[in-house]
Image (cartoon, rainbow, N blue to C red):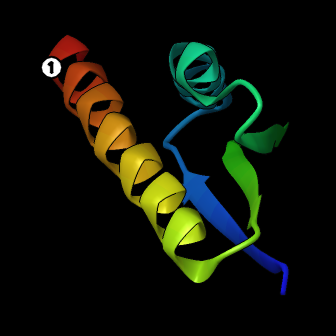
Amino acid sequence: MHFKADIKLEYKTKPQAKVALESLKPDNIDFLDSKINGKTLIFEISGESIRSLLATADDLIFCEMMVEKILNDLE
């Protein structure tokens, strides 16, 4: 069975979305596809098991929380 999920993250500005994308990109090579639509990041995750999909989503969300904290500290 194959599982898919999309995670959408909306930022205050398009430049913040770009910074987040570039910050998260090295950690996500070969695990998911990502793109920017305006000020929203869209991550497309897929996996052969729900466990692997959830693990990837968990890692992504944890890393994004760090990016968000840094962006907020810079304001």
Q: Quadrant of residue 2?
A: bottom right
Which residue reaches farthest bottom? 1
Q: Residue at x 63, y 25 (%)?
A: 21
- Residue type of the residue flagged with mark 1: Asp
Question: Which of 51 and 57 lies nearest the eye of the viewer?
Answer: 51
Q: Residue at x 60, y 31 (%)?
A: 17
> Residue 16: image x %, image y %?
53, 25
Q: Residue at x 59, y 80 (%)?
A: 50
In the picture provided, is 14 more to the left or to the right than 66? right
> Residue 12: image x %, image y %?
49, 42
Which of the image's four quarters has the N terminus? bottom right
Q: Is residue 15 above or below residue 57?
A: above
Q: Residue at x 56, y 54 (%)?
A: 10
Query: How many numbered discs sit on the rendered protein?
Result: 1
Question: Which of 19 and 49 lies nearest the eye of the viewer?
Answer: 49
Q: Is residue 75 above or below residue 36?
A: above
> Residue 60: image x %, image y %?
46, 46
Q: Is residue 70 above or below residue 54?
A: above
Disc 1, SS:
helix
Q: Is residue 18 above or below residue 8?
A: above
Q: Tell me the residue that label 1 is attached to.
A: 73
In the picture provided, is 58 more to the left or to the right than 37? left
> Residue 53: image x %, image y %?
59, 67
Q: Residues within 10 Å of mark 1 (few under 14, many from 20)?
A: few
In the picture provided, is 30 more to the left or to the right than 58? right
Which of the image's four quarters has the C terminus? top left
Q: Quadrant of residue 72?
A: top left
